[in-house]
Amino acid sequence: MLKLYYAPGTCALASHITLEEVGAPYSAERLNFRNNQQNSADYLRINPKGRVPTLVTDNGVLTETPAILAFLAQSFPQAKLAPLDDPMAFAQVQSVNSYLCSTVHVAHAHKMRGSRWASEEGSLADMKRKVPETMMACFALIERDILKGPWVMGEQYTICDPYLYTIAGWLESDGVDMTKLPKIVAHRKRMEERPAVATVLAEEKAAA
């Protein structure tokens, strides 16, 4: 059985939703970030990066959201969460998820994780001030050029959708004006109408 390690409010939500969507038998274990559980010796033996998500499978451990989402789509093709029979279309799905991982998530991380890139207080403060601008720029591009609607890739729900939903959930706290992103707001509403999303949100809230 698959086992997901997650923490509320993190990008692990995308993997958690996808596990529910594909109907996989799995368990989910919450890590307490406030107690620094992600850096405990027990967890670092599982994921030396000390981050979430981590997915433990019968064939080994997977980290990084795009890899986990692709693995789930390929392992449970009956869920039809990716165009697995079309190399170009699947690469386009991966392109979206890579952008969310390598650019958008990193822009958000400058608010609370600036010490990864700088140590001077002035630099950290400057990074924080920049977050509303950089996140708005990222999501303006997504709104205009990436989100085809009603789902990210168009008519078909894919592994891009829980990932976009997860990161878009940080926008208000990042100081982004949501009135300028009507397609993102509509996507969020559609996501929250899905039974898998409601189930996972309730589970994570109960575990918090």
Image (cartoon, rainbow, N blue to C red):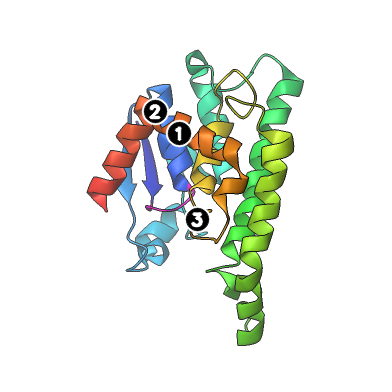
Quadrant of image for the C terminus: bottom left
Vertical position of residue 43 compared to residue 100: above or below: below
Quadrant of res 141: top right
Secondary structure mainly formed by the magenta segment: loop
Residue 166 appears left or right of 94: left
Residue 122 appears left or right of 190: right
User: How far apart are the alpha carbons under marks 1 and 3?
Assistant: 15 Å
Mark positioned earlier in the residue sequence (2 or 3): 3
Q: Residue at x 72, y 22 (%)?
A: 89
The circle drawn on residue 193 is 2
Quadrant of res 157: top right
What range of the chain is rendered magenta? 7-11
Q: Residue at x 62, y 62 (%)?
A: 132
The image shows residue 114 at horizontal and vertical percentages of: 59, 72
Quadrant of image for the N terminus: top left
Which kind of residue does numbered mark 2 sit on?
Answer: Glu
- Residue 64 highlighted magenta (yes or no): no
Q: Residue at x 66, y 68 (%)?
A: 130
Q: Residue at x 62, y 72 (%)?
A: 129
Vertical position of residue 58 compared to residue 62: above or below: above
For numbered disc 3, what is the local secondary structure?
loop
Residue 97 seen from this side: yes
Mark positioned earlier in the residue sequence (1 or 3): 3
Nearest the viewer among 150 and 95 is 150
The residue singled out by tag 3 in the image is 172
Direction left: furthest residue: 206
The residue singled out by tag 1 in the image is 189
Which kind of residue does numbered mark 1 sit on?
Answer: Lys
The image shows residue 184 at horizontal and vertical percentages of: 57, 39
Which kind of residue does numbered mark 3 sit on?
Answer: Glu
